[in-house]
Amino acid sequence: MAPVRRLLHTRYRVNDIEKTAAFYRDVLGLAEVRRHKSPRGSELVFFKAPESDETIEICSFPASGPVHVQADLTHLAFEVDSLEEFARHLEKFGLKYSDGPTLKPDGGGFAFIDAPEGYEIELIQKARQPSAGGY
């Protein structure tokens, strides 16, 4: 038996939980699956991507002091169908990629956007699958 079985969620602490929740819900299109207050008083909002089992926990706990996210500390990575289409989606919110997109000859690629509070979000476009005839 393995010591752990599976990843359940990842927590990101933030200063403004409502602004961050709106970003994850409206810009990224994640579903808010639950929201509650922990026994110690943390405000918690959990999000899930449509094809994932793991959740992302956004936490606000002002008693621990303000959040200061240093550059390149951590990021979440999400698969998208098209980086070009996602860039057009971002424009609706007045946003654009902070880095990229970087495209590869096989059709795959990646780009980054900055979430509220300074956390990075990586968007990954998978490589095209070769066709049955090798084309």
Image (spheres, rainbow, N blue to C red):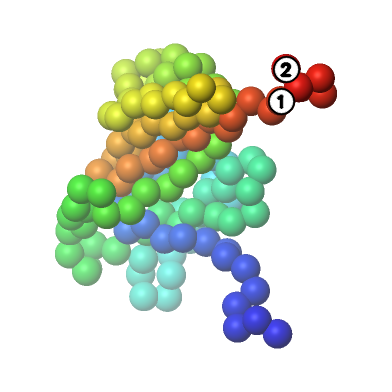
| Disc 2 residue crowd, few under 14, some 14–19, many 20+, Cα 10 Å | few
| Disc 1 residue crowd, few under 14, some 14–19, many 20+, Cα 10 Å | few
- Is 17 placed left or right of 33 in the picture? left
Q: Is residue 112 above or below residue 96?
A: below
Number of numbered discs: 2
Name the residue that disc number 1 marks: 130
Q: Position of residue 97 (x, y in %)?
A: 33, 26
Instruction: Tell me where residue 6 sits by quadrant.
Output: bottom right
Q: CA distance from mark 2 to mark 1?
A: 6 Å
* Quadrant, the N terminus: bottom right
Mark 1: secondary structure: loop
Tag shown at residue 135: 2
Q: Are marks 2 and 1 in contact (CB under 8 Å)?
A: yes
Kind of residue at badge 2: Tyr
Q: Is residue 5 above or below residue 13?
A: below
Q: Is residue 12 above or below residue 100?
A: below
Q: Nearer the viewer, residue 134 or 10?
A: 134
- Is 25 placed left or right of 48 in the picture? left
Mark 2: secondary structure: loop
Q: Residue furthest front?
A: 134
Q: Residue at x 23, y 62 (%)?
A: 62
Q: Residue at x 44, y 24 (%)?
A: 103
* Quadrant, the C terminus: top right
Tag shown at residue 118: none
Q: Residue at x 47, y 26 (%)?
A: 104
